[in-house]
Structures are given as C-alpha cells and as structure tokens.
Amino acid sequence: MIRRIAAVVASTVLASSLLAAISASAATSGSIKLNATVAQTCTVAVTDAGATLNILSGSSNVAVGSVVENCNDGAGYTITVASANNGTLKSSATGAQAIGYTTTYDGTNGSGASFAVTRSGAQFNKTSNVSVTVPANAQAIAGSYADTLTITIAGK
C-alpha cells in the first residue's frame, strides 16, 4: 500500500511538473517558415525542315528549320548556332571546294564557326526560324555538300 501511495504521489508530482512545463512554453501564436526552390531549366526543341540548297544558282534565305526556346532564367539566356564545318558546305568529291554560307537565326545573321543570340529575360515557347543563304557558284564541282548546325541554349 505504501508503494502504491508513493507511486501515486510520484505520478502526481510528475504530472504537475509536466503541466507546468507545457503551460510555461505554450504561446498564443507561432510561425512556420516556408521555403521553395525552382531549378533553372533551359531547353530547345529543334525541327529540321529537310530543305535542299541550290549551290549553282544560289539560295536566298531558305528556311532550314525552326527552334522552340524555353528558359526560366529571369536574367535571360543565350542561343548559340554552331556549324560543324565553320560555316561551309563541304563535299568529299575530288576537287570540290568548301562553299561558304550565311545563317540567319530569328533575324540575326552569322557566318563562320558560330554566333550567338542573347535574350534579356525568361521566355517560354518562343519559336525562332533558322534560314540559310548560299551565294551562287556556277563552277561548283559535282557532288553532295553538307554541314550540320547545332543549336544550344544556356541561361545566364
């Protein structure tokens, strides 16, 4: 019985102490801090138009493809148009010379290895056209001529 009384007294003292601690730390308001992060995402979707260029009589501003740009960088982004052959159409035919051309991306002209177009803010689903101009070369050697344009996007 004495043990029971001691256990009841100990329980009562413990409960009183716990209640006092809860009452002392209870407040009328509190706050929860919320945090979130959005990762930078920049992508291009390139569509090849399958166009054929005419080297002998020249080709002016021929649509060769289009690009859909998406970039959520508020500071903007850069699109780079790079040529595998430094801005020339090349052929493996004997005696063939490389044929230079000019690329236009969304109104910006470039030639050579690469050029860049800079955007000043985020954009979503922006479609840009890619076209090529090849000067006439009536003395071009017979054969297939080719180059590859690579379009890349990078946030600032």
Image (cartoon, grey):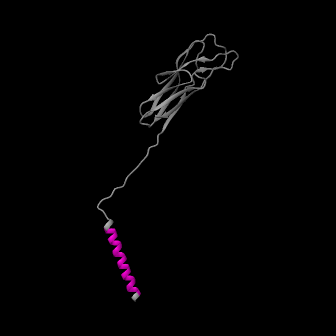
Task: Please name whichever residue, 134 or 51, is drawn nearer the observer in this view of the structure.
Answer: 134
The residue under the point 37% across, 82% down is 8
Relative horizontal placement of residue 104, taking residue 52 as reference (left or right) = left
In percent of width and height, residue 122 lies at 42, 34
The residue under the point 41% across, 86% down is 3
Asked where in the image residue 51 lies, by quadrant, the reply is: top right
In percent of width and height, residue 43 lies at 50, 35
In percent of width and height, residue 59 lies at 55, 16
In percent of width and height, residue 4 lies at 40, 86
Does the stretch in magenta take in 104?
Answer: no
Residue that sits furthest to the top in the current view: 138
Does the stretch in magenta take in 21?
Answer: yes
* Total count of labels: 0
Task: Please name whichever residue, 124 or 34, is drawn nearer the observer in this view of the structure.
Answer: 34
Residue that sits furthest to the bottom in the current view: 1
Residue that sits furthest to the left in the current view: 28
Asked where in the image residue 111 lies, by quadrant, the reply is: top right
Magenta-colored span: 3-23
Relative horizontal placement of residue 76, taking residue 49 as reference (left or right) = left
Quadrant in the picture for the N terminus? bottom left
